[in-house]
Each structure stands twice: as C-alpha cells, then as structure tokens.
Image: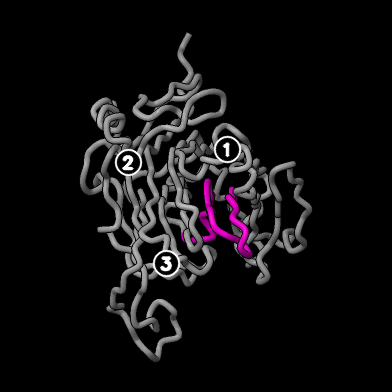
Amino acid sequence: MMSGNKLFFLVMTILSVGSCSGSGTGAGRPLPYGTAPQEYEGYELVWSDEFDSPGRPAAHWSYESGFVRNGELQWYRPENAEVRGGCLVITARAETVPNPWYDSLSTDWRKNRRRAEFTSACVTTSGSFSFRYGRMEVRARIPVAQGAWPAIWTLGQDVPWPDGGEVDVMEFYRRDGYPEIMANACWPASPRDTVPEDAPGTAMTVASDFVTPDGTVRWDETKTPLSYFTGRNSRWAGEFHLWRMDWDPGYIRIYLDGELLNEINLRKADMAGTASGGEPFNPFSNGREGSGHYILLNLAIGANGGEPDLASFPLEYEVDFVRVYRAAPAEAE
C-alpha cells in the first residue's frame, strides 16, 4: 500500500513544530521527515505505510484487544491508535477500564484481573501482509519513561509462537532499572541448544545466546544501554530514529541509525523444534509457502517495562513510516 509524499505535513510540521519533526541527516542518520522512500540498489519497495491520511490507521492494520501477553498492565484497544501529523501515534493512558472477561476463580491472569489501570494499542499486519527476506525500515520516536515497553517486531504468519519464530527489531525497557534497547530473535529449541553458547558482544552491546529454563525456546539477544546513545547525543530520546532489519536466507541483521546491533546466524535455527520431538523447521529460512512474518507495533506497560511512573502519562509512541523492500528480480540480458 504505497502512498504519496508528505509535502503538506512537512509544511505544517515546520510551522507548528509538530510531532514528526526530523532529527537530521548524514551518515547513519534517519532520513529527513517528508522524504519519499529511499531507493536501494538490488531492492524494490513492495509495501509501505507513510501515515499521511489522518484518522484511523489504514485497513491493512488490525488490532489486538484486551490483556494479551506477558502479564502486562495495559488493555489493548483500537482507539489508542490514530494517524495525525504524518505519524501513527500509539498513546498509553493511565485510566481504568473494566475487564469484561473477569472471573475471580480463574487461574488465567487475563481473566482474574477485575480491571485494567492502563490502556494502549498494538497494531499488526496479520492477515493482510507478511514477508520473508528483504529489508524492513521503521522510523520512530519511542517513549523512554519508566514502565514503557515499545516494540517493533515480527511473528510467523499462520504458525503459532514459538514455532513461527520472532524477530524483535526494537524493544525498549528498563531491565533491573537500567534502560536498554534490545535487538533479538527467538525460535523453538533443539536438543543441542540445551547448553547456552557464549555470544560475542561489542564495545556497546551485551550479547546473549540462551535457552529458556524449560528448554523450549532459544534466544539470540543483544542489549545496548540507552546511555550509549544519549551519551553521544543528549537529545536522542526526543528524536526520531531509523530501525532496519535486513533478512536473507543466512542472516538477520538489525540496525539502529545505520549501526549494527545484532547479526543472527539463521543456521542456528536449522533444527528448531526438535527439542520437543517435532520435525526440524527453520522458521526464518525455508521454502515453505505462507511461512512469512507479519509486523507488529505496540506500546506495552509494565511487566518487563517495570513499574510505571504515573507522572509521565500519557505516553506517545510515534511511527513516521514502515517500509518493506524485497530483492529486485534480475533483469534479463
């Protein structure tokens, strides 16, 4: 769903210092606000949303509803997502909503909570768009307050988690009180994954390659302290940044403003699922039709995000664009 340019919104932004003002250009910097999709040699743009039609997000976005995962505090609902000022804006609010599924006797946390104390939104392309291999770019400004857990991620279409794999292009939260940006992937474990491997980090990241305690899921994770970015640019948290995932049959590479955060060797997932007695299936590198990934953008509250700071609400997570490229077909000679 390719849309036109953002000239109107660019003018309005300059006049009003709107929410989607740019953060500069240069090597490794995000594209300036209002630009057309970048052309890359060897790639063609196959899907994008520039968020230039105010109101509800376009019909290719669907919504998660209610309490969904991880024991998080927010109630997901569509009305917390809107397009304004040339951005998708997901707003988390400190407000009480009743839980229509409430059951005081249930052991399911989604049902035994009488109410939610926060609302937010999660939008996805499940059922409308999925892809395998190529390049995905998301330009966004994320909230970094205590309790916030914004994410850009993908999940297997029509394949349940973890069998379909997961890629976390961006997660932010405060682990043990320390704010970090994560770039991760996970998949079903194999028997050889039961002993965690050493994972080399870099001067800026801490890398982990581990299996969950129950032996079912393997993670390839990097954590970069927020201070790494804010130490170089004190205005970092108030600016837009460009997250990118490059995905080919051998590797997934995740970048932030052109800087590599994680390189995931997909051969490690060749025996995925065999720890539980299943047939091997690499969810990231295979020839199976319909095994692509769909996109999720969400702002969770609590759980890994930590105890929310009520004084910081409402929180806004702003997305300037989402663009997906695939390898261009070779031209016939």
In x, y percent, where is residue 106? 41, 87
Tell me the tag on residue 310: 3
**Most common secondary structure along the magenta stretch:** strand
Q: Residue at x 65, y 41 (%)?
A: 263
Indicate left or right for 179 with 37 as reference. right
Q: Earlier in the sequence, mark 1 or mark 2?
A: 2
Residues 249 and 254: in front is 254
User: In the picture, residue 103 is in which quadrant?
Assistant: bottom left
Residue pointed to by mark 1:
233
**Residue reaching furthest bottom?**
105
The one nearer the camera, 90 or 251, is 90
**What's the residue at 34%, 41% (across, down)?**
19
Residue neighbourhood size for the residue with mark 3, other residues' Cα within 10 Å, grouped as few (<14), some (14–19), many (≥20): few
Q: CA distance from mark 1 to mark 2?
A: 23 Å
Which is more foreground, mark 1 or mark 2?
1
Start-end of magenta stretch:
160-184
Give residue 67's mark: none
Q: Pick whichever, 58 or 266, lies toward us.
A: 58
Amino acid, disc 2: Cys
Q: CA distance from mark 1 to mark 3?
A: 26 Å
Residue 174: name its quadrant: bottom right
Q: Which amino acid, mark 3? A: Leu
Q: Which residue is mark 2?
A: 87
Eyeballing the image, is 319 above or below 158? above
* Picture coordinates of residue 277, whole percent (x, y): 63, 66
